[in-house]
Amino acid sequence: MSAGGEPVRSFRRLIEGRYFEGPRWYDDHLWVSDTLSRTVWRVGIDGEKTRVCKTEDIPCGLGHLPSSELLILGMFQKRLWKWSEGGLVLYADLSVAAAGTIDDMIVDGKGRAWVGDLGFDLLKGPVAGGVGRILCVTPDGRTRVAAEGLDFPNGIAVSGDGERLVVAESSGDCLSEFRIEADGSLSAHRRFGAFDEPDGVCLDDRRDAWVGLFSEDAFVRVEASGRVAERIPTPGRRAVACCFGGADGRSLFCITAVTTHEDLMQGRSTSAIDIVDVEVSGAGAP
């Protein structure tokens, strides 16, 4: 234990790249986008990686359908692609529904894709206020707006029981939680937590959220009350995103990067994925 009573965590390096996003554990492998290389990778627990595909657009959010097919979100063309039989086929065109640049995406146990819509054009710079939205793409390919009023919706997670959706509001400096109704609509919106620029998020089996804090260079575990129960510093490295995986579901795959927002716009970044062991396993998606 540390002097503050928190467990002492140690990282194990898995792979390195340019700028990783969207980590997902599926079929005993980690699936991840290297956005600046426009490549989706499949990575073994030993670090051996296989290129799944190259994309024209920047790939960000990933998720597997119940059929095991992989969905890949294209950030600026606003397309959701399905990797099927060695090729990319259009799964859903989000350009009509999206009000701005689209960001992260996950797929829940019912095959619904939940997509973050920033509500503004990221290349033209941020817009103040809650203009962001969550889009829901149903298994038949239809898209609807499920939530509005979010301040830069970023990482998205759904609980293991499929009844709770949590999204990081990067410019709002908090997490937002919704109840997922039987018809797939979102209700009972509440905000919790207070920290600088939350990015990727995942949930554990006690319903706590693990969050990468881009501006604080740390991963934190946040209770439903909003209290930060644990902090894992990543000094000098931006904490980007995390997900659970491994044989027992207690390996936390953590993406960090040496970069800034300005550097990213110029394609300058080095990134890594490290593994840290925790006591409570993950639950839900991602």
Image: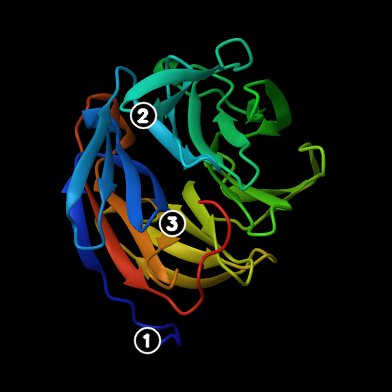
Label 2 sits on what residue type? Answer: Pro
Contact between marks 1 and 3 (CB within 8 A): the answer is no
Label 1 sits on what residue type? Answer: Ser
Q: Nearer the viewer, residue 216 or 56?
A: 56
Quadrant of the image containing the N terminus? bottom left
Label 1, label 2: how far apart the Cα atoms are: 38 Å
**Circle nearer the viewer, 1 or 2:** 2
Contact between marks 3 and 2 (CB within 8 A): the answer is no
Where is residue 279 drawn, in percent x and y? 46, 80
* Residue 234, numbered circle: none
Q: Residue at x 33, y 52 (%)?
A: 30
Using the rendered view, name the quadrant where residue 169 is placed. Answer: top right
Q: Is residue 207 visible?
A: yes
Label 3, label 2: how far apart the Cα atoms are: 17 Å
Q: Give the total number of marks visible in the rendering.
A: 3
* Residue 2, numbered circle: 1
Of mark 1 and mark 2, the one earlier in the sequence is: 1
Using the rendered view, name the quadrant where residue 74 is placed. Answer: top left
Where is residue 106 drawn, in percent x and y? 53, 41
Q: Residue at x 44, y 83 (%)?
A: 6
Where is residue 165 drawn, in percent x and y? 67, 48
Vertically, is 238 above or below 102? below
**Circle nearer the viewer, 1 or 3:** 3
**Would you call the spot at circle 2 few (<14 residues within 10 Å), some (14-19), or many (20 or more)?**
many
Vertically, is 5 above or below 217? below
Query: Pointer 3: what residue?
Result: 243
SS category of the residue bearing label 1: loop
Of mark 3 and mark 2, the one earlier in the sequence is: 2
* Residue 59, numbered circle: 2
Of mark 1 and mark 3, the one earlier in the sequence is: 1
